[in-house]
Image: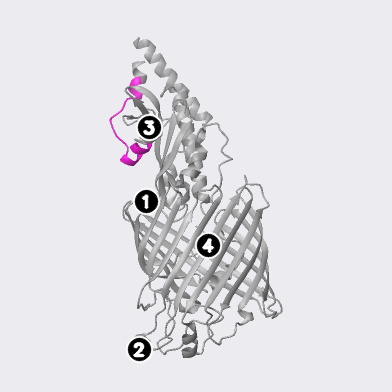
Amino acid sequence: MKKLSLLALLALVSSIGFAQQSNPALTQSTAQRIISSNSGTPVTLGGYAEIKYNQPNGKNGTLDAHRVIAFIAYRFDDKLQFVSEIEFEHASVLEVEQAFVNYNLSNAFNLRAGLMLVPFGITNLYHEPTTFNGVNRPFLNKYIVPSTWREIGVGFAGTDYATSLSYEAYLFNGIRSLDSEGNGLIGGKNGIRSGRQSAEKAKMDSPSLAVKVDYFGINGLRTAVSGFFGRSVADDDYLDVTGATVGISMIGGDYRYVNGRFTSRGEFVYASLSDTEAYNQLTGKSLGSAFSGGYVEAAFNLLSVEKKQKLDAFVRYQEYDTHAKTAGNLAQNDAYDRNDVTMGLSFHPTPGVVFKGDYQWFGDRANNDLGNQINFGVGVWF
Amino acid sequence: MSSLACLALTPLSQPSKKVVKQVQATFDIETIDFTPIVVDHSSITLEENTYYKLSVQDSLIGYAVIDKAPSKTALFDYLVVTDKELSILRSRVITYREEYGGAIGSYRWLKQFIGKKHDSDFNDIAAISGATISVQSMKKAIIESLETLQLLQNEKIIP
């Protein structure tokens, strides 16, 4: 019996040896995988960068290190994590894009507090250059959703795997409508963009609520609804002045779809603003009482899905109108009802690096000649 | 025979409540014993308490793998439960630790792995927008778990 078991042991040892030779992949243990990435340490370093060349027809081109960002996170333990993003814009302006603490109470409840991205639509949250097609972010996310939109706040985020739902719900300081001299910050062409406070001694009278709910239960499809509700703030000196603040209710829907080499995405936004007539009277601005916009994009990977490289050919049509409605005597300005078609290529030599090239045709309902533009860019995310 | 038994013999160590609950729900049985699989040999290394034999009153019903895999910047914990023939009965993400890619925990998405074995075709697993890295990582982790179980079975370390 003893002899037999010894033989068995020998046979086992030698066969394990063979098995290992025939299947070297198996010898890469989890531990090795952990060590070979930085993901086993409590500190995470990362970043992204996008460098662009925009060449409008008949004008000078612009070459810009638009965004270079360092991502630093620290995991205190399984429950507590600090996340930050420090950003250089246009190679000089230093900004803090995110700085918040995540307290994981359970998968469904993470308490978050600090400087966070406003959870609205796709691009504001997923804005790393390798995650979207086109050199420039869709302009819907400039004029209507003021990306990169971040404010200081507190709230909850969570995921429920059984229902395939995730959510984020925060109270933030809201949009600022007047500066300290009483000048209007928000207006007709750029909507609420200049009312972002971005954690620079932001003012708050009452908090704004931002909520996003994602559903990812259908394979290949991810859909979400977003909402932002609040009242803008003005300096203490102007708080009782009629027209100093406006109400903002913004709702949106978005989807992302992937099936093999085909991908598609879209974002749709409608914003309703109250008391804009009084605001415009006070400031001389032409703020619309409703904004609307949306885009649809389709892309096809020209390379085989088995390849690490990806070459997406894409086309996107979008509209964005900051004068979808106006209040009082303010006439709708058709020049604020804009649209563009963007066509181009995104070449990913490896996940995390992208070379982009595209062509954009701009238009508006006033039939102004807005010209065309060719763009090239390089982006990384690690 | 006794030496083989020795190789697979184990100190008692139980996985987390969350894992136990998922495994119980898989078989719809409450009294499942978890026995860690220990391989005392240098050419196969298993992390401690990652591979388990599952049994009910000493009769084997399947296996569970509880391990970590990388998402973009962190590690997530996953669970794979197989039957005795090493085909997947259930897979779950137990803890996910970063912003991006959490959608791989969706029960609906993970359903696609049910019935897969180490030599199955995994190319039909659907992609998830915004979770490319985690999807690849989960696929790889599940395949490696199945291959390791298969190797353990080939070597008769597990029945």
Q: Which residue is mark 4?
A: A253
Q: At 32% from the left edge and 25% from the top edge, which residue is drawn?
A: B9
Q: Is residue B129 visible?
A: no
Contact check, label 2 and label 4, Cβ < 8 Å: no
- Chain assignment, label 2: A
Residue B14 counted in the magenta span: yes
Q: CA distance from mark 4 to mark 3?
A: 39 Å
Residue A263 counted in the magenta span: no
SS assignment at label 1: loop
Amino acid type of the residue that numbered disc 4 sits on in the rendered structure = Gly
The local crowd at label 4, few if under 14, some if 14 to 19, many if 20 or more residues have their Cα within 10 Å, is: many
Q: Which mark is residue A237?
A: 2
Q: Are marks 3 and 1 on the same chain?
A: no
SS assignment at label 4: strand
Q: At 35% from the left edge and 55% from the top edge, which residue is drawn?
A: A109
Extent of the magenta region: B5-23
Q: At 41% from the left edge and 73% from the top edge, which residue is drawn?
A: A230
